[in-house]
Image (cartoon, grey):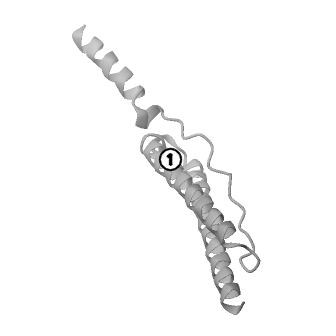
Amino acid sequence: MKKQLLGMIFAVVFATSPSFSEDCGEPPLDQPAIPDGAAATADEIRSARNAVVSYSAKVDEYLTCMDLRAVKLVPFMTKEQKVRWDEDLADLHDTRRELQNQMNLAIRSYREAQQSS
């Protein structure tokens, strides 16, 4: 009886722990707009950069949460599900990197425009 009770308590604590039950929600989809660096003001560039940094932090938080969930879920996935899981997370990371690259290009364009004026 004590072993059963102990087992039930362990199961409830384990199932309700944040790393097991936490729902990561939807991936961040609110990508900020990148201004045309050659025509943007300093405030527009600064604001866009801050928005990209904030978006990147949301992506990091989501990916970290999904990594924690993967520890529990991946052992029970089929090969196809694992491939899809990895592809979806890689796509999100790649999208973020592309946004960061676009922001860097806008900053370079802004600086070039400032130097030539």
Q: Which residue is situated farthest in the front direction here?
A: 117
- Residue sitting at x 63%, y 77%: 107
Residue 63, percent from left and from top: 51, 52
Check disc 1 and report its element: helix, strand or loop: helix
Tell me which amino acid carries mark 1.
Met
Residue 49 or 55: which is nearer the viewer? 49
What is the crowding at mark 1: few (fewer than 14 residues within 10 Å), some, or many (at least 20)? many
Residue 110 or 11: which is nearer the viewer? 110
Picture mark count:
1
Q: Which residue is situated farthest in the left direction here?
A: 2
Residue with the mark numbered 1: 66
- Residue sitting at x 61%, y 76%: 104
Q: Is residue 69 left or right of residue 94?
A: left
Q: Is residue 39 above or below residue 67?
A: below
- Residue sitting at x 42%, y 45%: 71
Residue 90, percent from left and from top: 57, 60
- Residue sitting at x 60%, y 66%: 49
Q: Is residue 68 left or right of residue 57?
A: left
Residue 43, percent from left and from top: 66, 67
Q: Is residue 43 above or below residue 65?
A: below
Residue 52 in sight: yes
Residue 17, percent from left and from top: 39, 30
Residue 57 or 49: which is nearer the viewer? 49
Residue 86 in sight: no
Q: Quadrant of the N terminus?
A: top left
Q: Is residue 48 above or below residue 8?
A: below
